[in-house]
Image (spheres, rainbow, N blue to C red):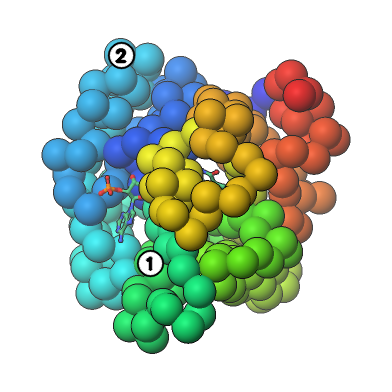
Amino acid sequence: MASLKDKVIVLTGASRGIGAAAARELAPDGPHLVLCARTAEACEETRQAVEALGASAECHGFEVADEGAARAFVDGVLAEHGRIDVLINNAGTGLMGSVADVKPDAYLEVLKINVMGPYNLISAVLPSMTERDEGTILNLTSARAFIPDRFYAAYCSSKAALLSMTQCLHFDLEDSNVKIFALSPGFTQTDMVNDIYANPVFRQAALTPDQGQPAERPAKVLAWLVREAPDDLAGKHNQVQFNDLTRRAGIEIV
Ligand SMILES: NC(=O)c1ccc[n+]([C@@H]2O[C@H](COP(=O)([O-])OP(=O)(O)OC[C@H]3O[C@@H](n4cnc5c(N)ncnc54)[C@H](OP(=O)(O)O)[C@@H]3O)[C@@H](O)[C@H]2O)c1
């Protein structure tokens, strides 16, 4: 099995939910984890947890939607560590509401975080990866890219755009050893899901947040994907609830 020992891994959305669980799954390999959220303080608990598990770590706070902030962050990490081996674009946001009710500014805000956030970081990191002809990028997408639903336009369309961008970048990279992956974690118990389901417009949903899987499950698949970076899964839509993926990742099928 490939090891991530001493790899420099940038992980956004590391303060809680799937990101915090992913950091804990990656930590025993002994990587250097660059943990990000909107504030550095929000990642402190994750930092302590991953250091206890064998990783070194540092915390950063910035707004992923802000291109200048994302670029300054990447430049700082490259200046300090000389390289970024893995970029995991996990930070994301949800918004419920009908198109009639969600005003353009609110819709744009979701696109800025869920689409431009990953794009800003990829744009800043990619030249250093292509120059070294090495690196892995992982974008957290969603099955909602394919499953439209009532009151879900902002989130579904943002994840569809992110998936499409991921697949196109895969083709851009076909002559390089830099690999890009899309991973959809599946319905998972996190703050995002709790917030979405607390919204009165979603009360008729068939599922309730407590029916979501624990964050550790997609986090295990994420860690496996980053560790192994299998060629045949690059540029594809990888969904945690696909049994062949979980089987390959060596975790239980539910
Ligand atoms: N949970 C699910 O069922 C599910 C299903 C499919 C896909 N996903 C995707 O999986 C990823 C993680 O979701 P989650 O459920 O773990 O979410 P979560 O619990 O709500 O955590 C979101 C994370 O993103 C960070 N973040 C949010 N907005 C940000 C911004 N503008 N700039 C920088 N950081 C920001 C948050 O940091 P702060 O602490 O600073 O707020 C937090 O660390 C998301 O991309 C989501 O779309 C989740």
Q: Nearer the viewer, residue 85 or 137?
A: 137
Residue hosting label 1: 113
Residue hosting label 2: 52
Depicted 148 relative to depicted 53: above or below: below
Depicted 29 relative to depicted 205: above or below: above
The residue shown at (74%, 19%) is: 252
From this viewpoint, which residue is outermost toward the top?
52
Q: Secondary structure at mark 1?
A: helix
Crowding near pointer 1: few (<14 within 10 Å), some, many (20+)? many
| Three-letter amino acid code at the position of disc 1 | Ile
| Three-letter amino acid code at the position of disc 2 | Ala
- In the rendered image, which quarter is residue 211 located in? top right
The residue shown at (72%, 46%) is: 239
Residue 194 at least partly seen: yes
Task: Say whether mark 1 is within 8 Å of ligand 1.
Answer: yes
From this viewpoint, which residue is outermost toward the left?
41
The residue shown at (41%, 70%) is: 110
